[in-house]
Image (cartoon, rainbow, N blue to C red):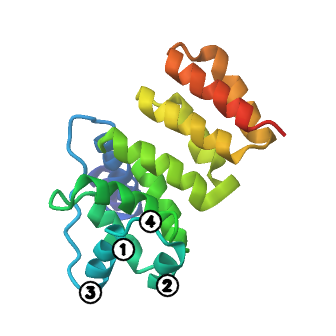
Amino acid sequence: MGLFGLAVLAGVGAVSNAAPARASVHAAAQPSSPPPSVAPVPGPLRDEALRLLAQPSLAGAAWRSLGPDVVPVLAALTEDPNVPDAQRMRAVTALSLVEAPQAGQTLQAMMEDPRRPADVRTRAAAALGQCLGFEAVTALRARLEDRDVRIREAVAQALGRLGGQQVREALEERLPREDVPQVREALQQGLTLAEP
């Protein structure tokens, strides 16, 4: 019993598993720290992804044919400063075209990470709705409370494109509490789009 108490105080064993989670949540709450760096993924899959991102349109079939292994490649490309901005943004959108559960998880993580640039987060919000459909409503709804005006605006638009009763309720609930005109307009547009 005494050894167990010492182990708990020392932070070892099963109890210490909670500590990293608290630390990562605390780290995520600090907007001043840079986004986590993702090492470039070399190889033919990266080369093929870059080739597809340079095309004038994103072909869903091409991304689906690459399979789930392309998800970490696209995630890395979104953070690679050597990749042109336009291709980095297209990499975020391309994640919505990959048929793999981790694509939606990656997009949600991008949208929720306050350390990421707003353009990545807003693109991730739109792509998440395209990727998961109604399954994205809960994650998107939570971002209607985001500190960043641009994220709230993008989320309102993404929700409006999804439509449905649950979306209408979320947008109607947020509208009277929103005081930024551009976000209020996006909420109202979302409500118009969400009309049954």
Pointers 2 and 1 in contact (C-beta within 8 Å):
no
Distance of label 1 from label 4 (alpha carbons)? 8 Å
The residue indicated by pointer 4 is 57
Marked residue nearer the N-terminal end (2 or 1): 1
- Of badges 1 and 4, nearer the viewer stands 4
Marked residue nearer the N-terminal end (3 or 1): 3
Above or below for 136 versus 192? below
SS class, disc 1: helix
Q: Amino acid at mark 3?
A: Pro
SS class, disc 3: helix
Distance of label 2 from label 1 (alpha carbons)? 12 Å
The 10 Å Cα crowd at callout 2, few under 14, some 14 to 19, many 20 or more, is few
The 10 Å Cα crowd at callout 3, few under 14, some 14 to 19, many 20 or more, is few
The residue indicated by pointer 1 is 52
Distance of label 4 from label 3 (alpha carbons)? 21 Å
Residue extending farthest to the right is 196
- Of badges 2 and 4, nearer the viewer stands 4
Distance of label 2 from label 4 (alpha carbons)? 16 Å
Instruction: Confirm whether residue 114 shows in the render.
Output: no
Distance of label 3 from label 2 (alpha carbons)? 14 Å
Q: Amino acid at mark 1?
A: Leu
Disc number for residue 65: 2
The residue indicated by pointer 3 is 44
In the image, 20: left or right of 61? left
